[in-house]
């Protein structure tokens, strides 16, 4: 255990935020509140974005293409060195789960605000992650904790052993890509070769694994926080079952109607697994939940898009804890202090057609956001903001909190009605329809609900 540094002699006083958009602003606010100085980076496409001016300094690090800017490790490190930043917060996406980058940051004598590179590497390999979780006593989806062999006959035998339907997944996959469901043996060969090719191209490694495809699970995840002093806590759970193409659209906390004793048992196992692997900072254990049982699918070793719903229900500022942990300070809370208050929802507002999902970059001619008790808006856009075609389409997150789930639903309906974004298409109409849907409003819908509903709506 390392000694606890004193708050008056911080390890760093200036943080470089290696990201863009709403999460760059979210991290910047936490950093400023703590009295730290901030450096924002931007690409040429984001040079005029108003949000980056609120920091102390900003550095334009390259052209619009992410590869030449937000993913360019050398450019990010150079910006940190040039501005004298002592730490780098990677946000989510981009370099946040890149173990080599975390190592390069530490090698440069700076602090990476995230877990040790070894934990990122283990959890970034979904096969290694599954193995580590089985060892830590965390229940996993049925299927081998090993890469698929090359020959189809052996793969077919494994699939037969698990029982169809099965899902073929890339060990290095992410963002809902590199996965294929196989319903019968005749489709197995094609699914394996197509996914292997996709894995090689998109993730730079061809390893695949196979597991049971669960028919009607919910996606339930656990937020954890750990420090360098052997403290690990879980902050409650979230339901992220509202997905399209394995991508989350609406999230809520807590997940409705899961017995508290089962939740606590899994939460404890997650916290224990963190101690076992020497985890540090914020992280999320993702599970599928079906017929009263939890099955681990993966761990995300970073801050997540949906972290605000847990902040609303726990009262804990997760980014502030990340910054404190990186300073070497202990968590401000122990497990006994963690409570869940009321209910929270988050709607991801994307610049896309609400029903065809085609991206809709362009200039926002008017932006109006809601307010009032229990309403939080995390966004970097304002009237006149130009949504670039180069980056993901998330432009705002509407978050509500209320004493009960029913009140939170009513609050979200009003918040959605009070939001207007003109000039580009957004998925606001989709959210408004969803929050009027009886089955969704009743809760406990599974991961297939949204796509089935969209299909029937046509
Ligand atoms: P990614 O890293 O791309 O987000 P995940 O492993 O987290 O991939 O899976 C994303 C989503 O895909 C899950 O939330 C779930 O909807 C679906 N999924 C993944 N594995 C299974 C499975 N074994 N059975 C059913 N659905 C699955």
Image (cartoon, grey):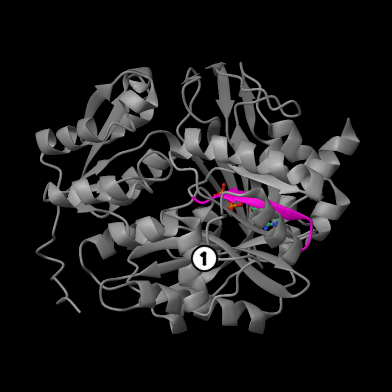
- Which residue does the numbered mark 1 point to in the structure image? 130
Residue toward you, 432 or 306: 306
When the figure is inspected, residue 278 is found, relative to residue 446, above or below; the finding is: below
Q: What is the span of residues highlighted in magenta in the rendered image?
A: 163-171
245 left or right of 50 in image: right
Which x, y percent locates residue 116?
28, 60
Which x, y percent locates residue 16?
23, 41
Asked if residue 246 shows in the view, the reply is no
Q: Residue at x 50, y 60 (%)?
A: 127
When the figure is inspected, residue 143 is found, relative to residue 137, above or below; the finding is: above
State yes or no: residue 119 in magenta. no
81 left or right of 155 in image: left
Say which quadrant the N terminus sits in: bottom left
Q: Secondary structure at mark 1?
A: helix
Which x, y percent locates residue 373?
58, 53
When the figure is inspected, residue 79 is found, relative to residue 63, above or below; the finding is: below
Residue toward you, 200 or 216: 200
Residue toward you, 181 or 333: 181
């Amino acid at each position: 255990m390392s000694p606890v540094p004193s708050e008056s002699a911080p390890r760093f006083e200036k943080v470089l935020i290696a990201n863009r958009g709403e999460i760059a602003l979210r991290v910047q606010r936490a950093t400023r509140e703590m009295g730290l100085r901030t450096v924002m980076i931007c690409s040429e496409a984001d040079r005029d974005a108003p949000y980056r001016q609120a920091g102390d300094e900003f550095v334009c690090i390259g052209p619009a293409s992410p590869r030449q800017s937000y993913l360019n490790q050398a450019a990010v490190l150079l910006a940190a060195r040039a501005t004298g930043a002592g730490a780098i917060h990677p946000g989510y996406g981009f370099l946040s789960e890149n173990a080599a980058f975390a190592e390069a940051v530490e090698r440069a004598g700076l602090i990476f605000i995230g877990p040790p590179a070894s934990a990122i590497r283990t959890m970034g390999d979904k096969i290694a992650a599954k193995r580590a979780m089985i060892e830590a006593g965390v229940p996993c989806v049925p299927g081998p904790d090993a890469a698929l062999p090359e020959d189809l006959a052996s793969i077919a035998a494994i699939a037969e052993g698990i029982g169809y339907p099965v899902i073929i997944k890339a060990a290095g996959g992410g963002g809902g890509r590199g996965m294929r469901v196989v319903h019968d043996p005749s489709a197995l060969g094609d699914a394996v070769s197509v996914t292997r090719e996709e894995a090689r191209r998109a993730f730079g490694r061809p390893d695949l694994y196979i597991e049971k495809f669960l028919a009607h699970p919910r996606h339930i995840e656990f937020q954890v926080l750990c420090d360098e002093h052997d403290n690990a806590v879980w902050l409650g759970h979230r339901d992220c079952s509202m997905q399209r193409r394995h991508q989350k659209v609406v999230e809520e906390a807590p997940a409705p109607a899961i017995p508290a004793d089962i939740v606590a048992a899994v939460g404890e196992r997650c916290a224990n697994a963190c101690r076992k692997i020497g985890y540090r900072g914020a992280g999320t254990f993702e599970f599928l939940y079906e017929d009263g049982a939890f099955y681990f699918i993966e761990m995300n070793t970073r801050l997540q898009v949906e972290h605000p719903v847990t902040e609303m229900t726990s009262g804990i500022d997760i980014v502030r804890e990340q910054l404190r942990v990186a300073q070497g300070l202990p968590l401000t809370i122990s497990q006994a202090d963690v409570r869940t208050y009321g209910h929270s929802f988050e709607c991801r507002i994307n610049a896309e057609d609400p029903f065809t999902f085609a991206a809709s970059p362009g200039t926002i001619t008017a932006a109006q956001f809601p307010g009032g008790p229990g309403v939080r808006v995390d966004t970097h856009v304002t009237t006149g903001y130009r949504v670039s075609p180069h980056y993901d389409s998330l432009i705002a997150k509407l978050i509500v909190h209320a004493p009960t789930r029913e009140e939170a639903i009513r609050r979200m309906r009003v918040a959605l009605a009070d939001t207007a974004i003109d000039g580009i298409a957004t998925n606001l109409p989709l959210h408004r329809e969803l929050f009027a849907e009886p089955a969704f409003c009743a809760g406990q819908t599974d991961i297939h609900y949204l796509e089935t509903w969209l299909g029937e709506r046509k």
